[in-house]
Image (spheres, helix red, strand yellow):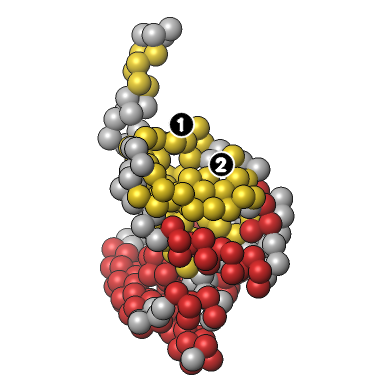
Amino acid sequence: MTADVRTRVRRQWRRYAVAAWVQVVASIAASFYLFLRFEQVRAGVVGSVIVNAMFVAYAYFVVDYNAAKPHTWARSSAKFGVAAWWVMWISLSGVKPYPPVGFIHFTLAVVWFAAWVLALRAKAKAEEDLSLDELMDADLATRFDARDNNAVLEVDDVKVFMACTVRKRRLFDRDTQTWTEWYGQRNRQYIGCSLGDIKSLRTIYIRRPRKVPMPKYDWMLLKLTPGPALQFDSPDGEWIFPSNRANDAFEVITEKRKKFGLGYPKLGPFIPPASS
């Protein structure tokens, strides 16, 4: 069954790769069209070529990096659409007068939507009816949702990764008599921990509600409500992740530490995020 799962995921990954690359190609084509149509200066052409080359390298890295992470494909494809639009805008630097680009915007929007749908379908088919054991046997990354928090925990062959979003509060500074951090804004933070840096991995049961700071970000509070949670120590502090699937997360991390060794210890903030 493991070989069948890997074959299916690989087949769907190719569809995700097509969704990503079609946006890259559309963005590069739009960039060079603007140069040829509006006769931008030579220096601008060189800059645009460099930007597009970096975009291609970035796409290659991200698409390959997400090969075993089907849960990221739809979100990653959407981000490629934003990057494609941004790279196209970079190509307009130095163009005077500003050219009409309404049709190009419309075309990129259509390509973005089609690519996102393709990546979403690929994600759904790759993860269809997969059990936890099959995910581990096929060496796929796994995602766990937090209970009563807008946060996720992702586990791959190298690291554990947490992303959390909270509302900022509007605080009053008594010294300056001013308000700071407007209420209603959202702040998202990411933190990764190598498998080799995890110490004292365990599951616990939360009996009374409370709040704890997110590792490394003391002002970022996670709500702990009654139920299971995953807990371990790391160089950035103690991790407590409330999840109804805490036991599954414990099993996945333990299995990956056995199978892949201890990851790459002491990488800290240099570990790339999983939802690129």
Q: Residues within 10 Å of mark 2 (few under 14, many from 20)?
A: some
The percent coordinates of residue 106 (x first, y second) are 28, 68
Q: Residues within 10 Å of mark 1 (few under 14, many from 20)?
A: few
The percent coordinates of residue 198 (x first, y second) are 63, 52
Picture layout, residue 63 above or below residue 253: below
* Residue 124 visible here: yes
Please state the total of marks drawn on the protein image.
Answer: 2
Calculate the distance from the C-alpha at mark 2 to the C-alpha at mark 1.
14 Å
Disc 2 vs disc 1: Cβ atoms closer than 8 Å?
no
Nearest to viewer (mark 2 / mark 1):
2
The percent coordinates of residue 96 (x first, y second) are 43, 53
Picture layout, residue 224 above or below residue 82: above
Point out which mark residue 238 bears: 2
Picture layout, residue 133 above or below residue 196: below
Tell me what residue is drawn at x 32 percent, y 25 percent. 170
Q: Which circle's residue, 2 or 1, is located before the other in the chain?
A: 1
Tell me what residue is drawn at x 31 percent, y 76 percent. 117
The front one of 107 and 196 is 196
Say which element carries label 1.
strand
Give the amino acid at mark 1.
Trp
* Residue 81 visible here: no
> Residue 110: which quarter of the image?
bottom left
> Residue 183: which quarter of the image?
top left
User: Which residue is denoted by mark 1 in the rendering?
Assistant: 219
Give the amino acid at mark 2.
Glu
Point out which mark residue 67 bears: none
The front one of 204 and 69 is 204
Say which element carries label 2.
strand
Tell me what residue is drawn at x 62 percent, y 50 percent. 200
